Each structure stands twice: as structure tokens, then as C-alpha cells.
Image: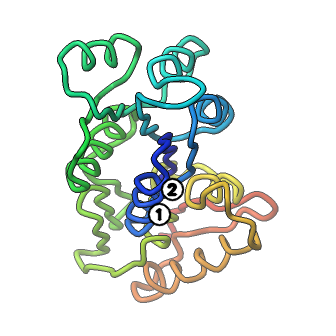
Amino acid sequence: MRVLVVEDERRLAESLQWGLEADGYAVDLAYDGLTGLARGQEHAYQVIVLDIMLPKLNGYKVCEALRACGVTTPILMLTAKNGEYDEAEALDTGADDFLSKPFSYVVLKARLRALTRRGRVSAAAELTFDDLVLNPAKRTVRRAGQPITLTSKEFAVLECLLRQDGEVVAKQEILDQVWDMAYRGDPNIVEVYVSTLRRKVDAPFGRRTIATVRGIGYRLVDDE
């Protein structure tokens, strides 16, 4: 899941990036409103965390501009203020939710999960393909009733495939969703993680669910 955090307090922004990436999110940062607006328009994010008090362009204006140009990405607005009028303005400019500083990181993650569930028609409590079951909220995977332990990145790649429900997922799309825009490594890293997933979710069960679509990417198939 790819998240944009627009926050001018660098220590807070980098702390959020560290925490969310440890939980398997891909996180891009912007430290001012104009940069946040440009990135929100250019890239497909699952959710945007947007501070109100930003240099160059405040969060209200960023949110309003994103909605005006047709960006429907769920927006969680952060503010040091806690007055009812500020909260009302956040919602009136197009935000989906708000959270006042200081906030609990546990609550922030819960709000992000709620927004992504609300923002995706295909989102469900569990994602399934045959006997493979992934629970995004509990971050668990099981097959034929047996639990499977995955790293954060492995989990994110598998979630990306499961959300397409058998449709082809391009390698670049997986990179965009699982790795942040700062990643400059070998794009073949996707192949490494797919290979690892096959060893964990297919091989022990005698299955070949993750298929390669040569020259394009990957898709889930029923091998029975």
C-alpha cells in the first residue's frame, strides 16, 4: 500500500515514514503544500496523510485543489488545532477524516486502514483466492487453514496480487505500490519477492498459484 505523508515537521514525517514502512507500507514524503499537491496529482496513492499548517500552501488548499482536479484518494488531515470549526473546515474542503496532534500511532494506523477500506470498492475484511486467505487488518496469511509467516514486503506484494483477483499485475505496478518513489534499486527485486512467495505460499502446498505473464508481470491462477 502506497501512502503520501505531507508534513513540514521533518522529525514527525520521518518518524511516520519509519513506522509505516516497518508495517509494510510504501511511504513518500512531502514537506510543503505545493510539493504535496504535485505528488498527489502525479501518483496513485491509497491514502494521503495531510497536515493543515504547511508552508507554501496550507492543507485546506491542497485538499481543495486535489478534489477540484478529480483526485479521489482518501485524505486524513492532521492538525495541531482541535477546534470544531477547524475539523468542519477540513471535512468541507474534501478530507475524509481528521486527527489532532499529538496522536497515537496505533490510532493513526487504524484510521488509515478504515480509510482504505472505505476508499476501495474491492476492499474486504479478507482477500481470498481459492484456499489462500490474507487479512489486511490483522496482517495474517493462511492457506488450507495453515498460517504462513511473511515479511512486510512479502505481505505487501501478495496483497497487491490478491487485490487484482486473477488479473495481470505489471511488475512496475507492484514497484509503485510496494516500494516508495525514493527506491532506486534493481526493479528485478520484484522477481526476488515473487520467488520467495512461491516458496512460502505455493511449494509447501503443492500448488502453482503465482504465474508469470512473460514480459508483463504476474497473476494468480487456479492450477487445479
Which residue is depicted at the point 64% across and 53% down?
176
Q: Secondary structure at mark 1?
A: helix
Q: Regarding mark 2 in the picture, which secondary structure is present there?
A: helix
Q: Which residue is mark 2?
A: 160
Q: Which residue is mark 1?
A: 156
- Name which residue type carries label 2: Cys
Instruction: Relative to 186, say whether 33 is above or below.
Output: above
In the rendered view, tell whether residue 115 sits above or below residue 216.
above
Mark 2 crowd level (few <14, some 14–19, many ≥20, 10 Å Cα): some
Q: Amino acid at mark 1?
A: Ala
Query: In this rendering, is residue 105 above or below 117?
Result: below
What is the x, y in percent for residue 42? 68, 34
For the rendered model, the colour scheme is rainbow
Vertical order, 125 against 187 (above or below):
above
Q: Nearer the viewer, residue 135 or 39?
A: 39
Label number found at residue 133: none
* Front tag of 1 and 2: 1
Q: What count of labels does the image hold?
A: 2
Q: Along the line of sight, which residue is nearer the eye, 12 or 164? A: 12
189 and 92: which one is in front? 92
* Side of 51 relative to 177 (left or right): left
Marks 1/2 in contact by CB < 8 Å: the verdict is yes
Q: What's the CA distance linking mark 1 and mark 2?
A: 6 Å
Relative image position of residue 222 (x, y in whole percent): 49, 64
Which quadrant of the structure image shows residue 220?
Answer: bottom right
Q: Residue at x 29, y 28 (%)?
A: 97
Please give left or right for residue 20 compared with residue 126 in the image.
Answer: right
Q: Residue at x 58, y 43 (%)?
A: 30
* Residue density around tag 1, few if under 14, some if 14–19, many if 20 or more, within 10 Å: many
Expressed as whole percent of the image width and height from the top left, the position of residue 186 reads 76, 73
